[in-house]
Image (cartoon, helix red, strand yellow):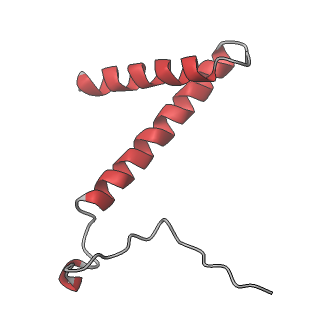
Amino acid sequence: MSKETVLNRATPTMSAGTSYAGLGREKTGAAEQTSKGARAHDRIARRAYELYEQGGRQDGRALEDWLKAERQLVGAASHS
């Protein structure tokens, strides 16, 4: 049997020169941006699925629904 290396993408790696002093604190920098990006992606995905259902579950419109969901959510965020 061969052993496989599995990377846990949910756990950020530390680069050279990174201090351990900040571990355990709230996320900052790239980790925070990744987390915000993941939340935004999830919101867009949920809205795109709602649009898919509202449109009668028509296949072949995934990109159109996704882009419409993005526009709606970005527009709503910019008015906040």
Query: On the picture, is 7 further left or further right than 31?
Result: right
Percent across and percent down for residue 19 are 19, 82
Percent across and percent down for residue 10 are 47, 66
Quarter of the view holding residue 30: bottom left
Query: On the picture, is 18 further left or further right than 40?
Result: left
Give the position of the N terminus as an image quadrant: bottom right
Closer to us: 17 or 66: 17
Label count reads 0
Query: On the picture, is 19 further left or further right than 77?
Result: left
Q: Residue at coordinates 44% horizontally, 71% vertically from top-left?
A: 11
When the figure is inspected, residue 52 is found, relative to residue 29, above or below; the finding is above
Closer to us: 27 or 5: 5
Give the position of the C terminus as an image quadrant: top left
Percent across and percent down for residue 48 are 56, 26
Q: Residue at coordinates 50% horizontally, 41% vertically from top-left?
A: 42
Percent across and percent down for residue 20 are 23, 84
Q: Residue furthest front?
A: 2
Quarter of the view holding residue 49: top right
Q: Residue furthest right?
A: 1
When the figure is inspected, residue 51 is found, relative to residue 77, above or below; the finding is above
Q: Residue at coordinates 40% horizontally, 20% vertically from top-left?
A: 71
Q: Residue at coordinates 46% horizontally, 40% vertically from top-left?
A: 41
